[in-house]
Image (cartoon, coloured by chain):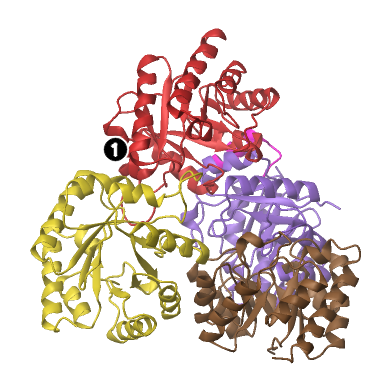
Chain colours: A red, B yellow, C purple, D brown
Amino acid sequence: MTVEIKKPFFVFNPKSYLYGEELVKLAKVADQMAAKYPECSVLVTVPFADIAPVKNETENIIVTAQHIDGIKPGRGIGHVLPESVYHAGARAVFLNHAERPMTVADLSKAMKRGKELGIKTIVCADSIDEARAVAIMGADAILCEPTELIGTGQTSDSSYIQQTNQAIKEIDENILVMQAAGISTPEDVYRTIELGADGTGCTSGITNADSPADMLIDMIDALMKAYTERGNQ
Amino acid sequence: MTVEIKKPFFVFNPKSYLYGEELVKLAKVADQMAAKYPECSVLVTVPFADIAPVKNETENIIVTAQHIDGIKPGRGIGHVLPESVYHAGARAVFLNHAERPMTVADLSKAMKRGKELGIKTIVCADSIDEARAVAIMGADAILCEPTELIGTGQTSDSSYIQQTNQAIKEIDENILVMQAAGISTPEDVYRTIELGADGTGCTSGITNADSPADMLIDMIDALMKAYTERGNQ
Amino acid sequence: MTVEIKKPFFVFNPKSYLYGEELVKLAKVADQMAAKYPECSVLVTVPFADIAPVKNETENIIVTAQHIDGIKPGRGIGHVLPESVYHAGARAVFLNHAERPMTVADLSKAMKRGKELGIKTIVCADSIDEARAVAIMGADAILCEPTELIGTGQTSDSSYIQQTNQAIKEIDENILVMQAAGISTPEDVYRTIELGADGTGCTSGITNADSPADMLIDMIDALMKAYTERGNQ
Amino acid sequence: MTVEIKKPFFVFNPKSYLYGEELVKLAKVADQMAAKYPECSVLVTVPFADIAPVKNETENIIVTAQHIDGIKPGRGIGHVLPESVYHAGARAVFLNHAERPMTVADLSKAMKRGKELGIKTIVCADSIDEARAVAIMGADAILCEPTELIGTGQTSDSSYIQQTNQAIKEIDENILVMQAAGISTPEDVYRTIELGADGTGCTSGITNADSPADMLIDMIDALMKAYTERGNQ
């Protein structure tokens, strides 16, 4: 069963900050928000070994893998078999993040495997050139994150957001554009969606908040508010 | 809770051939064999996303991860967080397999994280020089597999087994020596243990057998028979 | 001083088969052919340490590096500094070969450095998707080589050649298309150019020939013959 | 023709900061110092494409490659063929630097090729565990550089120097120990040799000095002074 990533969407991406019960607890908060706003998609990325436990405790979020390799069942120890993460419950995957860069050939193979199995691909690109390249390769969504801003708390400016939006939609208007550099407050979320992004997301802004659950809730509320106010375009 | 890998030990290593129900089914067969022979250890390697499901259905095997990265909770998307696989149930891990080679520095870091958490490290070495290097770095077990023999159905000869055994035990007699190149029949298992290996294992010899479950049973029976007959040394 | 790669072009790509005097000797043969046919370009790829010696002994060929990294002068030991290979005489470079795959980000950076310095980029792509991606990233030439055919002596069929030609020229008609899978005889060269490739090249078909020099001469003659006969389009 | 690295030794390691004429100029200064002190060895690391030009202009230094791959003549585009750098004049090589880490298997192969050709291997290790591992693999010299200190201008303390010295000499007393973390003044050189290192070296302390040539001269003078004063042990 394939899922669709809707507009707008929010990605709670705790990277390797969380695992086990603490991760399940926040995933359930995200799940309630996804139930509250069925017109948007809420994705939660989790470590590979947490996919099944998180899936078992949630209903509405899109459980998202942090990576897959473009392999088929067979040899390949230590690689991430797409069938295994799909079976455990993942329906989307991040690919080519600056912290886990992929070769052109490996990325192409992993994107093909995602399409075959019904795992949506959110492909990272850290320049406009790269965004155009992964768009033409058929990404379902593109995370436009200038490498130099990751983890700085500094967001992309409106010109960068508009340029990447345009570059990607020119190639295929169905590709979702995610802008997430430096998101650390609900206001950052609001502003990024207001500027035209289809989706956004956050890591340490949530995991390091006084109350991660409240921050997650406020950010998804801000996402919906901005999307509604900009007229759902 | 740390586990010990006992002498002798058998590793059912289905790599990326199996996942989901089919993997759980065979893991349960391995689990019965581990219950039958409490004096040996039976390890089953599984894809990351299958660790929790396999752990939930078994009691006696050592669920084994295919890789971990030497990271701590924090940033690092697409990497394998040791805490996550430990929490899901893994108590051993393969590192530095020829299909997933690691840099010296990354291997060293991953081995340290394994020790900290109680995840036993089975480190692969494809030459005697490499076996000595990973022995001195503190591996719990070393898989001595000349790269050129992987997947060929050709086993290591007795001279290679004796040389690697000696090279490793000279450095630390507590390190377990695993020999598994080309194991495809119970006779191969018998002969390898008879020649002095502490443990052995198999991939496609089991997954491609007419009855994988029967082959797995026969191999573990052969392991115990050889170990008993050689006088448990 | 930038050079242009002309249509048609031939790449003698001895990879790591040759170095030192033997390489200089064949590079001089290529140089004579480049002098004989000033309307085409002859490229010779050489190991990094052979760039200066080959450049010093030739005048007409385009000395070509096997790789560059997208770095600027500064830290970075063991990487290939573009300024260094340019200064030694390289004016073109292969990037992203299946034997030296690059991440999307690293490829993008290396291509930018090539443009800045006047080093023409010949970027490898082993599927049509990848060819389109590297075309949109701004490659000067694209080597379309289905990975599975490398080193097999089997050439790409006419349908593959036409499809990649079309996919690339649709994006930018100025990008040169190189087809070189399995070229081992002058007839292969003739046929590949006849089918519409802008350039072709050869490795072991030359280095393993009874007379590498004669084979090189015959292949470049065949290139020009085919190009002339197809009407220089 | 093999060369020996003598005790003490100094490595001028301009990484990718220098190339072309500027590099040749400083290499000639190093060459004069090597002539002045024939009882020590002076190594200069250079980009691959600068090996031949630097070798041609010098007589006394050991021209040193920044990396080699463990390959033999044959396929392998974009890799560094040991025969090519040897032929161009390199007689030593750095391996496994934190900026160019190698897998255990690749490092082992490259070290073997170095031995076969007469290229001395200076292998980097960023912890004592790693130093012991590369010692047992047969390094000619080991650069002990805690990764966290590279480029900080902070030198290793005497306890770290003594521990690594002891760990390495215990395994093989003929292996040369190089300590170079944070060397930025002649005083740092003096102190490091005084503490018992066999050799040391410098990058930006020289390239960023007001007069790189004078700094290089002063550092090599300091090396010899310390070595003489400690009684040549």
Q: Quadrant of the N terminus of chain A?
A: top left
Residue identifier under label 1: A53
Front residue of this view, candidates D121 and D180: D180
Question: In the rendered structure, the residue with mark 1 lies on which chain?
Answer: A
Front residue of this view, candidates B6 and C185: B6
Start and end of the magenta stretch?
C163-176
Q: Quadrant of residue D15?
A: bottom right
Residue at the image point whose x is 51% and y is 45% from the top: C127
Whole-percent x, y for residue A194 in the image:
60, 15
Answer left or right for B23 relative to B78: left
The answer to whether residue D112 of the structure is visible from this angle is no
The secondary structure type at the circle numbered 1 is helix
Amino acid at pointer 1 = Pro
Residue at the image point whose x is 19% and y is 82% from the top: B194
Front residue of this view, candidates C57 and A163: A163
Tell me, yes or no, whether the highlighted magenta stretch contains residue A105. Answer: no
Q: Quadrant of residue B205?
A: bottom left
